Amino acid sequence: MPQAAAFLLFGKKTMRIENVKVYTQEQRFREGAIAIEDGVFAEHTEDTKEIVNGNGCYAIPGLIDIHFHGCKGHDFCDGTEEALAAICRYEASVGVTAVAPAAMTLPVEHLENILSTAAAYQKQGSSPERADLLGVNMEGPFISRHKKGAQDEAYIIPASLEIFHRFQKAADGLVKYMAVAPEEPGALAFIEQAKEEVTVSLGHTNADYDTAKAAFDKGASHAVHLYNAMPPFGHRAPGVVGAVADSDRVMAELICDGVHVHPAVVRATFQMLGSSRIVFISDSMRAAGMPDGKYSLGGQAVRVAGRKAALVSDGALAGSVTNLMECMRTAVKEMGIPLEQAVACASVNPAKSLGAYDQYGSISPGKKANLVLLDEQLQVKMVMKDGRILSAEENASKNH
């Protein structure tokens, strides 16, 4: 897989990628070609100046990760533009061309500084060598101490519209998701107040079915990493998972790293919700793309061994070390999810959830030309960002 390979700039405005299996808006693959003009997908191009032979690869839209913390030794909550640039550069190199990183439970003032840094970074605009920053996912601090996971309970506070507005002001509108534990005091009122301003998600919650269902009925429309940091799905106590299943407009995040959710449960979730309501996320922390060892998440020590990241203090899972492309590959090759559905969950659905499907999430004329070529083993052979090839291997050969 290419890792931060050299950026190839052809200096030409038109391109055609031939001999590929194109992922269509109908979520099927068809043999064909892809036209790109001035950085966007086109119906066709006149006087094509660059032709790329895809050698039969799958051509899919760039993936979109709406919930992850970091990678390559950096964390979103480091709160620096340098960290964000490094994170977005790595994500693009593995085929994740747009992101909405997640903030941890930290002091309010600290979160405001992180969000203002994100806003300043986003104002730099799109770069062909870095994933686009489309938003921020606030995983805290309006959560439950009983299901805090790897979050620091010292900074957990009740849901507050005033504090949310402080976050949104600091972020200059970049906050796209706000997690709450609906059983906590004031949470249901917050959902009613904030639902028109942000996607309210249920996460790190100990809510029972009735409370979660009431939250969805009041306007919450998203679930943070389904099954994790919430009560189990029981036949007499279905909890948040059951409430998600019974709420047709709710989308649910799912971590398919082979650690967080058993393959049988992933398959059952697809049967229960259907592929249109599932959003694959990586939940990766700074150890993604790095060797085993000791790291940190939200100020807490983490030990990484293989695919597993866990708090040193109590062994709680502390995010993942698997990027979204690897998660999608795991879902297909180890969990039996059809590739067509997995691509939808890693690109189409997150784009729709973010309200960005007009520009991202499909290979459609007029949309940003963010594209990945995968071989039969689903290994990345080429990444294209904004119509320019970021990285390529021999499988995708250039013809001049």
Image (spheres, grey):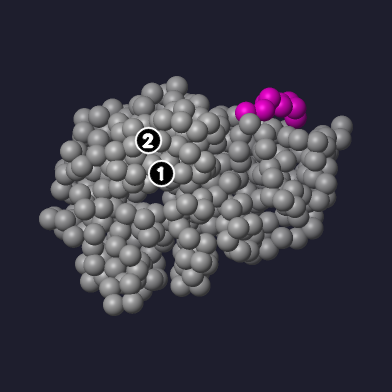
Q: Please report the bounds of the magenta region as a residue range.
A: 4-12
Query: Viewer-proximal residue, 376 or 177?
Result: 376
Which secondary structure dominates the residues rendered in magenta?
A: loop
SS class, disc 2: strand
Q: Look at 26% across and 48% down and name the residue there.
A: 148
| Residue 179 shows in the view | yes
Quarter of the N terminus within the rendering: top right
Q: Amino acid at mark 1?
A: Gly
| Residue 52 shows in the view | no
Query: Viewer-proximal residue, 53 or 144?
Result: 144
Q: Look at 69% across and 50% down and name the residue there.
A: 378
Q: Please say if the residues under marks 2 and 1 sit with CB atoms less than 8 Å apart.
A: yes
Q: Look at 58% across and 46% down and name the residue there.
A: 326
Q: Is residue 172 above or below residue 62?
A: above
Residue found at the very far right of the displayed protein: 400
SS class, disc 1: strand
| Residue 131 disc label | none
Q: Amino acid at mark 2?
A: Val
Q: Where is residue 396, by image quadrant?
A: top right
Residue found at the very far left of the displayed protein: 185
Q: Which residue is mark 2?
A: 302
Residue 253 point in image, percent of width and height: 43, 56
Q: Which residue is mark 1?
A: 319
Which one is earlier in the sequence, the residue at label 2 or at label 1? 2
Q: Residue 10 lies in magenta, yes or no?
A: yes
Residue 106 point in image, percent of width and height: 25, 35
Residue 46 point in image, percent of width and height: 80, 42
Residue 71 point in image, percent of width and height: 48, 33
Q: Is residue 192 above or below residue 198?
A: below
Q: Residue 268 lies in magenta, yes or no?
A: no
Say left or right for 36 vs 324.
right
